Image (tube, rainbow, N blue to C red):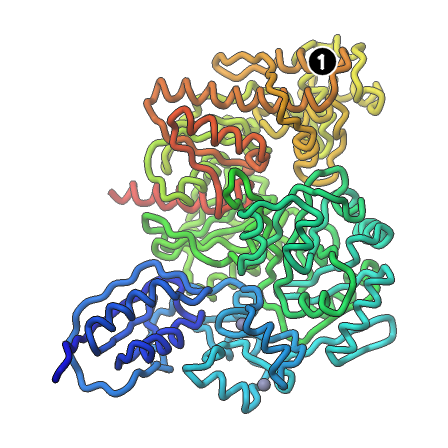
Amino acid sequence: MIKELKACEITVNGLVQGVGFRPFIYRIAKIYDLVGWVENRNDCVKIKVQGNSKKIRGFIAAIREETPRLARIESLIYKDSEIEELQGFKVAVKDNITDRSTLISPDVSVCHECLNDIKTQSNRLNYPFVNCTNCGPRFSLIKATPYDRDNTTMNEFLMCAKCKKEYENPLDRRFHAQPNACCNCGPKYLLVHKSRRMEGVDSIINAICTLIKDGNIIAIKGVGGFHLACDAQNEEAVKKLRTRKNRECKPFAVLMPDVDTVRNYAHLDEHEEQLLLSYQRPIVLLKMKRELASSVSVGLDRVGIMLPYTPLHHLIFESSLFKSLVLTSGNVTDNPIVINNNQAQKELIHIADAFLLNNREIYNRNDDSVTVVVNSRPRLMRRSRGFAPEPILLKFESNGIIAAGAEKKNCFCIGKRNQAILSQHMGDLKNIETFEFYKESIIKFQRLFRFKPELIAHDLHPDYLSTKYAIESGIETVAIQHHHAHIASCMAEHGLDEKVIGVSLDGTGLGDDNNIWGGEFFLCDLAEYERYAYFDYVPMQGGNKSVEEPWRMAVSYLYKTYGKNFVNMKLPFRDEIPNDKVDLLISAIDNNINTTLTSSAGRLFDAISALMNVCLISSYEAEAAMRLECLIDEREKGCYLYEINETIMVKEVIKNIVNDLTAGINNRTIATKFHNTIISIIVDVIKRMNNVSKIKVVVLSGGLFQNRYILENLENILEKNECRVFTHKRIPTNDGGIALGQLAIAAKRRELQCV
Ligand code: ZN
Ligand code: ZN
Ligand code: FE
């Protein structure tokens, strides 16, 4: 009897190459008893199967349901095909590719099976470089495409016979796992402590556990760069790290062995737990329950925690008694993280007591990613390891466009067809080494993604190094307003291509009237914006100094509100700032020396934070606002008065805060009332915009939406007001996401001109 025999051709698009997809197809084809083949094509995987039609249906369902953990299926199309003479199921090893897939997998945390292998496989006992098609480094070691071993930094290691056999067996988990290695053929760690050099993983692990226990700081080479590690419960060690790193207050991230341990120290809901355990293994900002060493997270109520993502992390926790490690970027302040051994021993010599080096080269530097959960939704605040360079799909063509990004927290972005490929975190371009890293990474991206720039989008600010880079590139340029780019980045993330109400509350960005914007309400689409409202201008004197020293903005707001009379007022912060400094600032404002006007909401938060004597000098970006947020008492529902005319006036807010301060009202109440006021202002302005425009789609973007109290409340209130609210999830709301917005705007404008 002949069963119903059918032939079917299947095309799968998405992140399906270099992620164990073909062996997966091979395995399920065997399970469903089908003959045929699978091969990599330009941007897809092609599959042909023949057999019983019911089994073919089961096979297709299995592709969708059992997708390997690194693969992302964007589309799966199947159609009937001719019955051919086929025998068995074959994996085409030679790929049928002309213009290679642009998709490169991010780095991925070690999988359970590999962790099991280092306990059971004789050639991988405690081997810290174990990996398979489901896990391990990818982006950090790819030098060129196609993704073959020769094009990775693993090309220096010749696979032994055993590894090679796995690599060539379609049924093996390590079939075409490019970084495949074992104790006998792969990279190795080396511990350098003073004049001692130690090899052999077991003795190394023991030695560093002892060193850490004794309060030492270790520089450890990881996946995307070096970390500096010390015992997070040893206050002396953490303090020493702060002093040596010259990092006064900026919080450190902490590595903990498992979720149970995390729960001992921090409040954890199911979404946060899921995020911690996700294969990207980002840092998750969590509300502290019990303190680690007090220097870990100075003055804040949150701590960034992550779980082990390399075999080495697991090995360290297994052999030690400590339950938490500070694991912070291995860099000299503001420089990019160190990625090579010599550089580490040179640059980190005054910070680290010992160096754990290895001989696997890191090609693409990649910091840890940072996330937070707000309103049960994960949000990326720094998008790097585990996420970059996974593309964001656009609803339109962006080929040949490169977006230079902003200045701080820079990422750049390139467009390949409808894909926006956002780079890993670069950092603050003002730092020379970071700017070098930026330029070098753009060249690397051009090669990796076979990208030829035709149009470069940049920020309106002429002094940003990214702008200078764009202008000097010789490519056609397009300048894009900072806050329009913020809104567009959120629109692009959500596939919006229509007129929206865009609210961008931010630090600073140049406006088209040459003032510094940052508290903006736009009616806009991807091509254009109309400025509907903004926070009334105040003078901002001293350029960057006014960002670094929030007390200056407090003076600015007080001066605007009271004139010179405020000088005699008794305010808590005035004890710290001498009169002559205040006088100097006022006269500089009067004489318009190095003074611009700003509508920045970030600067308003700075002003309030300083006015309340919470933070007068900021030792890291947004410190003043973060400290203010820490004071929030959710039971307080009060709000200050404000005025909305052509601009948003906060004179009454300042006056009422001054009154509250003088009346001895506690800081928690004042901080909360101030936050409630900002929320109320935003809702009010949006309502007016709803009325005049009939638009109900609201997009929120900009650095200030890192404030969870504001974000959470706004989402809830606006949704109740029947708005469709879009906020960032996969892309940072801060300047790390801006390049995506620049790219989307440039693409849209180019498209419209073509019409
Ligand atoms: Zn694995
Ligand atoms: Zn081997
Ligand atoms: Fe910004």
Regarding residue 593, the answer to whether it shows in the image is no
Q: Is residue 180 above or below residue 502?
A: below
Q: Which residue is mark 1?
A: 660
The amino acid pointed to by label 1 is Asp
In which quarter of the view is residue 527 placed?
Answer: top left
Please tell me how crowded label 1 is: few (under 14), some (14-19), or many (20+) other residues with Cα within 10 Å.
some
Toward the viewer: 30 or 591? 30
Question: Element under label 1?
Answer: helix
Ligand 2 image-quadrant field:
bottom right
- Which quarter of the rendered picture does the C terminus lie within? top left
Residue drawn 36% across the image and 46% down it: 747
Toward the viewer: 599 or 620? 620
Q: Is residue 625 above or below residue 54?
A: above
Percent coordinates x, y for residue 248 in the rendering: 79, 43
Percent coordinates x, y for residue 631 in the rendering: 69, 29
Percent coordinates x, y for residue 69 in the rendering: 46, 64
